[in-house]
Image (cartoon, rainbow, N blue to C red):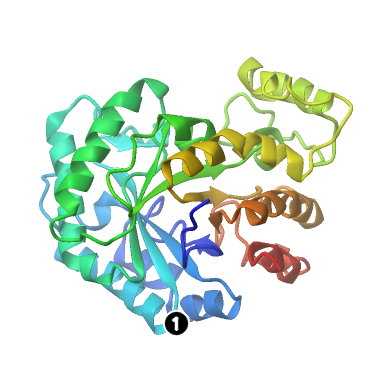
Amino acid sequence: MKKFEGYEHGINFGGWLSQCNHTVSHYDTFIVSEDFAKVKAWGLDHIRIPVDYDLIMDNGGIFLENGFRYLDFAIGECRANGLNMILDLHRTPGFSFDPAVHENGFFENERYQELFYRIWESFAERYGDFSDSVAFELLNEVTDKEYCDTWNRIATECIRRIRPVAPNTKILVGGYYNNSVVAVRDIAPPQDENIIYNFHCYEPLLFTHQGATWISSMDHSFRCPFLQTYAEYAKGSAEQLGAAFSASFAQFDPDATPDENYFETLFEDAIAVAEERNVPLYCGEYGVIDLVAPEETLLWYEAFHKALKRHGIGSAAWSFRRMDFGIDDARMDGVRERLLALIRHE
């Protein structure tokens, strides 16, 4: 399968310019120069930087020049440290993956769509010359499957508008169900050789999101180990997440426990599509909630990265600091070096 060169071992800077308190004080302190150097010292090759439109555009669609300086800073720090960067539009006018944000109407409203195109035209004009080190991710985690055809149309038009000023920039496109790997087959065929198919992976959700306060159906005191049987995963998922999540385990031996073959099975169809269309496959988010014991987190990372390594799939872990998944957080001190070795595919 075609590789996404230079974007094989990465991490997210979640919570800096997205999913945050949008103030200068926060922007100036959450991530600083030393953090880019630390990522380089960890032996990683790129950083995915989620960005909410609030950083660079007001509610009237007027660009905020002061906001672009943080993107200029990020690109400069990445280049100074020999790191590549993915500029990910995490929230656009009218859409967020998070329903609590109440950002709605993007897929029905042409004005919102035009603002989306304008944002990307501006990014392309400003950063298209850095195609050797900066890639563009059009939109984070399209939610409902019903948006598939509309999203394919919007993404196709957006790429068409980007290309006159950024002809060689790598562009990442994901699918519905929050960039689910099952949606890869329904992503529009690549328009050129610089398109990347993007997915996220937090499976099994029962394990990676156990106790998550943002999942309303889940008992926030619920805990489970990674190495439980598929029958136990099916039962727990039915109780905590719903029947649809439980049904996904029906294809596995109920008495077996997950290993790299679990992820091989999850990725199988997406890999086939990527090979058929000669498109690199990339996992832009994955990780385990900080309510899980670090040694248990390590077991999940080991199985997950064995599958990625086997197929040369690039990835970026969620997330560098805090955000319920922080790898740089003190709680991970005892396992961090082993975890980073897995991310580096050693």
Note whether 138 is above or below 81 in the view shown.
above
- Residue at x 83%, y 23% (from the top left corner): 231
> In this view of the protein, can residue 210 be seen by the observer?
no
- Residue at x 58%, y 81% (from the top left corner): 41
Closer-to-camera residue (141/320): 141
Closer-to-camera residue (246/239): 246
Task: Indicate the amino acid at tag 1.
Answer: Asn
The spot of residue 209 in percent (x, y) is 65, 39
Note whether 105 is above or below 329 in the view shown.
above
Residue at the far bottom in the pictured view: 80
Determine whether, in the image, residue 108 is placed left or right of residue 289. left
The spot of residue 115 in percent (x, y) is 15, 43
Note whether 204 is above or below 193 in the view shown.
above
Closer-to-camera residue (12/54): 12
- Which residue is disc 1 drawn over? 81
Q: Quadrant of the C terminus?
A: bottom right
Number of numbered markers: 1
Tag 1: Cα neighbours inside 10 Å, few (<14), some, or many (≥20)?
A: some
The spot of residue 228 in percent (x, y) is 85, 35
Determine whether, in the image, residue 302 is placed left or right of residue 148. right
- Residue at x 25%, y 28% (from the top left corner): 107
Element type where label 1 sits in the image: loop
The spot of residue 56 in percent (x, y) is 21, 57
Determine whether, in the image, residue 341 is placed left or right of residue 112. right
Residue at the far top in the pictured view: 243
Closer-to-camera residue (71/17): 71
- Residue at x 29%, y 32% (from the top left corner): 152
> In this view of the protein, can residue 295 be seen by the observer?
yes
Residue 204, picture quadrant: top right
